[in-house]
Image (spheres, grey):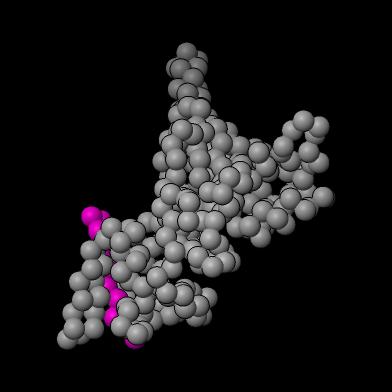
Amino acid sequence: MRKCLRVLCFLAAITILASISPFTSQASTPYTHITLVDSSGEPEIMYILYDPVANPQMAGYKNAQPYLVEPIWESGHYLIPLGQIAGILKFKVNFNANTSEITLTDDNNAIILTLNSNTAFVNGVKNSLDTAPRSINGRTMVPVGFVSQNLGYFVTFDEGYISISDCAFISRDEMTQMLRDKTGWTAPSPGTLCQTALPGTLTQKGIGVGDSIDKVISVYGKPSRNFVKNALFTGAIKYYDNFHFQGNNESLEFVFKNGIVTQMVLNYE
């Protein structure tokens, strides 16, 4: 009888241990939802539309195009010519003159816009637009952010240019605020070009040590770089600021272990 009890206790203990994941953190939910692969050697894809008067130096950058016409800023969104963004992102355009519907398609997505309408459909799902597409001086102008983001890109606006990329960037304003914060980050050590977040420090978007990589990516988007050491969700992800293409390598890096952020680092290489 005692032998049977010992066997039953042993089996129960094994069952309990097996149910405890080695990757579970009490601080946050483990990283599970987004597949990370090491992209440390891969360049990001970036397209730049710029004001040739304000930023003539951008003419030399790869994938940079001057504005065909000045973008229209309305309700927090830029309208740019449909033909220019279609040429950059390589999607097909079909216009129905009877309904004023514009259908944009690539290999994976279909977006339906209607001139002067704030309703759009993305892969059959109804969406509301803050700024309606319209025809101005013979050009069809569409919200560049809505179109690009629903085709899987990230859009950054700054003075005199618009960047469209396959990864997200830290805004110049957020990076500047963090670099000026003398209480939340260590001072750079002699010979180093980085600062580490002090305990309790949060980024401008509310991320801190102990948060999951899931949360980081849901807040900041696809990182500019992934440095993944192994399959145990351990490594680092990095977000460059949106002047990265000009040679400015300031970045915010999240170091993580078992999918949980263990350190945050500001780099200015």
Q: Quadrant of the C terminus?
A: top right
Residue 176 is left or right of residue 255, and the answer is right
The spot of residue 2 in percent (x, y) is 50, 15
Residue sitting nearer the eye, 162 or 7 = 162
Residue 199 seen anywhere in this rendered image of the structure: no
Name the residue rendered at 70%, 55% in the picture. Answer: 176
Name the residue rendered at 82%, 50% in the picture. Answer: 182
Residue sitting nearer the eye, 169 or 204 = 169
Name the residue rendered at 35%, 65% in the picture. Answer: 85
Q: Is residue 221 magenta?
A: no
Q: Is residue 110 magenta?
A: yes
Considering only vertical position in the picture, is 31 above or below 228? below
Considering only vertical position in the picture, is 144 above or below 88? below
The spot of residue 19 in percent (x, y) is 47, 32
Residue 111 seen anywhere in this rendered image of the structure: yes
**Main SS of residues in magenta:** loop
Residue at the extreme top of the image, as rendered: 3
The spot of residue 149 in percent (x, y) is 40, 62
Name the residue rendered at 79%, 41% in the picture. Answer: 186
Residue sitting nearer the eye, 87 or 126 = 87
Q: Which quadrant would residue 95 be assigned to in this image? A: bottom left
Considering only vertical position in the picture, is 174 above or below 24? below
Considering only vertical position in the picture, is 110 above or below 130? above
The spot of residue 241 in percent (x, y) is 59, 51
Q: How many marks?
A: 0
Q: Which residues are magenta?
A: 106-118
Residue 88 is left or right of residue 52, and the answer is left
